[in-house]
Amino acid sequence: MVDLSIVEAGLVSGGIVAIASAWYGRKESSSWDEVLLFLGFIVGAAMIGIGAWAWSLGEYDISTRLILVLLGLSLFLRAIKGIKLASLIALIVGGAVGYGLYWLGKTYELEFLSSTVVLVVAFIVLIIVYVIFKFAEDLLDMGGVVLGFRPLQFLMGLAALGEAGLLLAGYSIWHFLA
């Protein structure tokens, strides 16, 4: 029986999901793409966590850590690419700031915090937060497009499976490159 560590298990599961997702493609007549997208989200998030953990330990070669993080980002970003969170986050923060200022004005009887001032400050905060998060969202979308390119994802999946096999044999891709 082969003793798999969490790193090898992450590489194998990520490699299988990436290859299946890249090979299967997007078919409108089937729901397998949504299943693979969901699995990619879960496995990608786990791979990012495992990669960060492996990076903090420093025990694994750079190839193992890079494959874990890049393939994890590829699977994770492909899944969240369509979710637009900037508007929602900005609305929540702007509303919280507006409510907080309104409560502060009423509690401490601050006359300069009129309804108009509270609305203007909340709107300015809303715009600033939206711009910041929209920029971050666009960067994540761009990374998702690049890393989610199916041929690249297929190759990264093969690399992950190869790295897992080499780790089980006591080597890594970095061992052969260095």
Image (cartoon, rainbow, N blue to C red):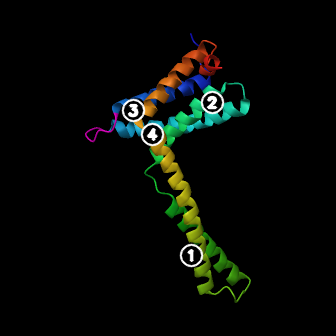
Q: Which residue occupies the foreground of this view, 100 or 176?
A: 176
- How far separated are the C-alphas under marks 2 and 4? 19 Å
Contact, mark 4 vs mark 3 (Cβ under 8 Å): no
Which residue matches tag 2? 65
Q: Which residues are magenta?
A: 25-30
Q: Which residue is at 43% across, 29% downward?
A: 154
Q: Which residue is at 73% across, 30% downward?
A: 57
Q: Amino acid at mark 2?
A: Arg
**As drawn, is 39 to the left or to the right of 98?**
left
Which residue matches tag 1? 123
Q: Amino acid at mark 4?
A: Gly
Which residue matches tag 4? 148
Q: Is residue 123 magenta?
A: no
- How far separated are the C-alphas under marks 2 and 3? 22 Å
- How far separated are the C-alphas under marks 4 and 3? 9 Å
Q: Amino acid at mark 3?
A: Ala
- How far separated are the C-alphas under marks 3 and 1? 43 Å
Which residue matches tag 3? 22
Percent coordinates x, y for residue 58 in the rendering: 72, 29
For numbered disc 1, what is the local secondary structure? Answer: helix
One can see residue 3 in this view: no
For numbered disc 3, what is the local secondary structure? Answer: helix
Percent coordinates x, y for residue 84 in the rendering: 47, 57
Mark positioned earlier in the residue sequence (4 or 3): 3
Mark positioned earlier in the residue sequence (3 or 1): 3
